[in-house]
């Protein structure tokens, strides 16, 4: 089993390669690797990312088949099915690192801010379910001076939403709390920059 710290180092290394335009040979899909994985999987990290087409998790971390257990949903929100997915990976495969990966200029955050400023009556119930999950972390920022600076407001809202999702996961269930307490499970928050390709792990990262 790979520890959370080792897993974090692997993700950082992979993102460094991605930023430098280098692809590792191991990350390339191959028939041999596919066949090898038919007998089981041991993903070394779970990543809860946004569905945004510009942030494909395996690619930005330069990882291949069988490496990552990925959950993607618009706005990287945490609903019961996301908590269940994290529990599943931790219990079935011993995955010890969980990363909430948000990104700059996230459309789900922008839609939530828009909805808070100019509520749309006819917004679909399903889309509203996502907006309602994002809302608490951005609502308080809208009450500050940040509301006069939209780019800064979006930037801070993205980070607040990542922190909220990571926190929600840390306390999302008795099982996860126990894994954190007794088995070295670590939940960290990170932001991907669309412009630079760099993933900044900024929340819950242990000091060396
Ligand atoms: Zn997004």
Image (cartoon, rainbow, N blue to C red):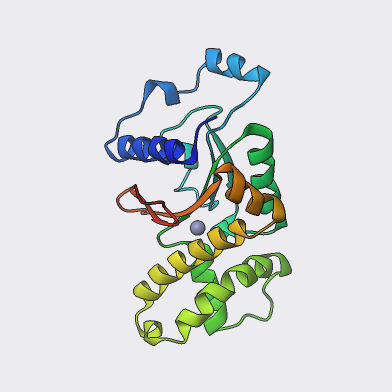
Rendered view: 63 above or below 168: above
The answer to which of 23 and 1 lies nearer the viewer is 1
Q: Write down the quadrant of residue 26 in the picture.
A: top left
Q: Is residue 100 visible?
A: no
Rendered view: 70 above or below 114: above
Q: Position of residue 32 (x, y in %)?
A: 54, 12
**Residue depicted at 30% across the width and 30% down the height:** 22
Q: Position of residue 75 (x, y in %)?
A: 55, 60
Rendered view: 74 above or below 60: below
Q: Position of residue 171 (x, y in %)?
A: 63, 60
**Residue depicted at 65% across the width and 22% down the height:** 40
Rendered view: 116 above or below 169: below
Which quadrant would the N terminus be assigned to in this image?
top right
Q: Position of residue 83 (x, y in %)?
A: 67, 53
**Residue depicted at 66% across the width and 18% down the height:** 38
The answer to which of 113 and 164 lies nearer the viewer is 164
**Residue depicted at 45% across the width and 80% down the height:** 141
């Amino acid at each position: 089993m790979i520890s959370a710290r080792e897993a974090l180092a692997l993700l950082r290394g992979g993102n460094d390669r991605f930023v430098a335009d280098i692809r590792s040979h191991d990350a390339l899909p191959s028939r041999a690797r596919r066949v090898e994985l038919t007998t089981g999987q041991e993903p070394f990290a779970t990543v809860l990312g946004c569905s945004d087409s510009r942030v494909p998790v395996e690619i930005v971390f330069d990882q291949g088949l069988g490496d990552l257990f990925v959950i993607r949903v618009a706005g990287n929100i945490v609903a019961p099915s996301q908590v269940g997915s994290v529990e599943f990976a931790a219990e079935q495969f011993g995955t010890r690192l969980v990363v909430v990966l948000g990104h700059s200029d996230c459309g789900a955050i922008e839609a939530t801010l828009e909805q808070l400023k100019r509520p749309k009556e006819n917004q679909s119930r399903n889309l509203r379910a996502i907006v309602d999950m994002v809302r608490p972390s951005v609502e308080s920022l809208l009450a500050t001076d940040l509301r006069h600076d939209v780019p800064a407001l979006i930037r801070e809202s993205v980070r607040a939403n990542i922190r909220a999702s990571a926190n929600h996961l840390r306390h999302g269930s008795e099982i996860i709390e126990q894994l954190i307490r007794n088995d070295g499970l670590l939940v960290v928050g990170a932001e991907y920059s669309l412009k630079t390709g760099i993933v900044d792990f900024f929340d819950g990262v242990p000091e060396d």
